[in-house]
Image (cartoon, coloured by chain):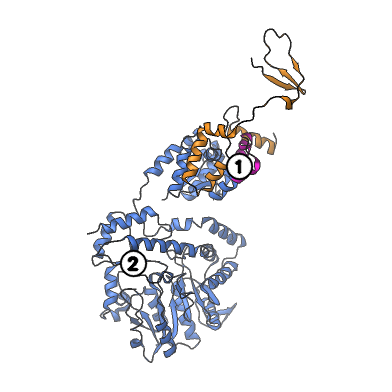
Chain colours: A blue, B orange
Amino acid sequence: MANRYIWDNNICLDLLLYRYQSNTEIALLYQLCIDKSIEIYLSSSQLQAIQYVYFSKSKDDGTTKENASKIWDTFVSKIVIVKTPSYIDFTNDLAISDIEDYVITLSAETIGAKIITGDKQFLKHSPITLTTQQAIDEIKKTETKQIAFLDLEKINFSYKTEIEKGIDRVVKRGWYLLGNEVKAFDTNYAQYIGTKHSIGVANGLDALRLILAAYIEMGVLTPGDEVIVPANTYIASILAISDNKLVPILVEPQLETYQIDDTKIEQAITAKTKAIMIVHLYGQCAYTETIAQLCKKHSLKLIEDNAQAHGCMFDKRKTGSLGDAAGHSFYPGKNLGAFGDAGAVTTNDGALADMVRTLANYGSHKKYVFDHRGVNSRLDEIQATVLTAKLSHLDNDTQKRKDIARYYIEHIKNFEITLPIITDWDAHVFHIFPIRCSRRDELQKYLLEKGIQTLIHYPIPPHKQGCYKEWNNDSYPITEQIHFQELSLPMSQVLHKDEMEKIVKTINSFK
Amino acid sequence: MILEVQKIDNQYVIKNPTKNMEEHFFLNIAAKDILKQKPNKKRIQQEDKSFAQLQTMAKAYPKDALLQMMVKYYKPHSTVNQLSDKEVLQKHLMEKYGK
């Protein structure tokens, strides 16, 4: 858990009025918060009291109201306000002795924070309070011990207020499916990707499955048709094909980029081939002009699996808008992640969009009229509101991921490690930062012993999985090499510089 | 000798008369005539440890808007004869919500 502190009223006033004489540690506390990027949290219940006392006392000191307002406004823009929960236990000792302190405590508990206070009674009655000096000691002692591969709580915490507002809106409206939030997200996401349509669905696998099912329903594809797909993809891309009774044809990737090798696609095309599914794996663009030309030459549909590459670019266009249709996943760990499963289909094809929407809603485009055998795969209002809140920050978050990737690339210096080769920084959003090492398992163990969690994407290639026994004896040497050697380093917009430094130092010391 | 003066009904009354003063003096002077030493802001700030501390910190963190504002509009905080935070708040609540 990150260092989170609610500042009690007296501590806020010590800072605002700069009462250095009565709280000599206030300067150090504030400096530490700046240095360690630690936010100042306040329960919404505290605001009135702090504001009144500040204005009253600054007036006594001779500060004009105008100048006091400037300081106050700057302070308010800097702090993070935490909601005051409605669930109050009136039998709680602190609630009985001091309801104000109890409410602050409840707010602190909602974010896993401690409370810094100079109030002796508060210090005595609440186990999560500490003095300024104690907070300073605690912050100083906090070392980067365990580095999680992905700290989802920390990531989503950054959007807390916007998400809270959206969820309140949904709860208040009492409309949970196919409502305004989904409509708004569909519009925003289509605009972001650069397509005419975006249809929110239940998850990324369904997004791909529904595209193919819609093409079958429209007579564009027929069961038994072949769909080319990279051999080293995540299983969902392949499941979407085989679930529709289509035939996945695996094509090897390039070792350097991990993306489908476009020089090997044409030899896999037969009379039955009707589509190519490219996968922007790890967040890197897989689309090439060669692939586009092949699709044109052989009249193939181009489907993008954009589950890992929200915001990735190809020549000023976003992935997800490059082919005939794209499937997107908003699984919580994705660059744009929901609070559960969620996905979307994007396309410029109006007929396909209508069919996907119909199939995702039991095959119905009119209530209780079912023209197609569909499924229930809809994005819900809560997920849509979470995604809308996070979408506006996506480009900024992507930039942070790129900065981390650049740091890794510039600082990891170990001849046993193969780093990604980046020729176009716009064409990668670093959902994953993959490295390769022939002693991958030893490296992973070494990093874990040093407190660094890594993952493998993916340990078993699709053709070696039990669900595709018919392929188990096939050979895809590049895919297999990747699966034997790939290791994914911690990567997210909330990764701190201390953590990056530790990761690099530890990898460089691996012998 | 310093005499303590209090304003009563627009008259300034000496509060600490000496033994020789059997009765209070009544001074007929207007408030504007009382000599006031204008505080020298710069001098006060130079002697103020809090300000020096704040200034050092603001210099160390030039991008921190709050510190820059606090230095710009700094006034020394008096601890003498000041109500406590709680008393100020109590006064406010009394004014807002009545007795």
* Residue drawn at point x = 73 percent, y = 18 percent: B13
Residue A354 x/y as whole percent: 55, 80
Amino acid carrying label 1: it is Gln
Specify the segment rendered in magenta: A48-70
Q: Nearer the viewer, residue B26 or A141?
A: B26
Residue A101 x/y as whole percent: 53, 40
Left or right, residue B40 beside residue A400: right
Extreme-left residue of the structure: A511
- Quick check: is A57 in the magenta stretch? yes
Answer yes or no: is residue A20 visible: no
For the residue carrying disc 2, how many other residues have a C-alpha within 10 Å: few (<14), some (14-19), or many (20+)?
many
Q: Nearer the viewer, residue A243 or A331?
A: A331
Q: Secondary structure at mark 1?
A: helix
Q: Chain of mark 1?
A: A
Image: B25 above or below A202: above
Which secondary structure is most common in the magenta stretch? helix
Amino acid carrying label 2: it is Pro
For the residue carrying disc 1, how many other residues have a C-alpha within 10 Å: few (<14), some (14-19), or many (20+)?
some
Residue at the disc numbered 1: A51
Residue at the disc numbered 2: A434
Left or right, residue A353 beside residue A486: right
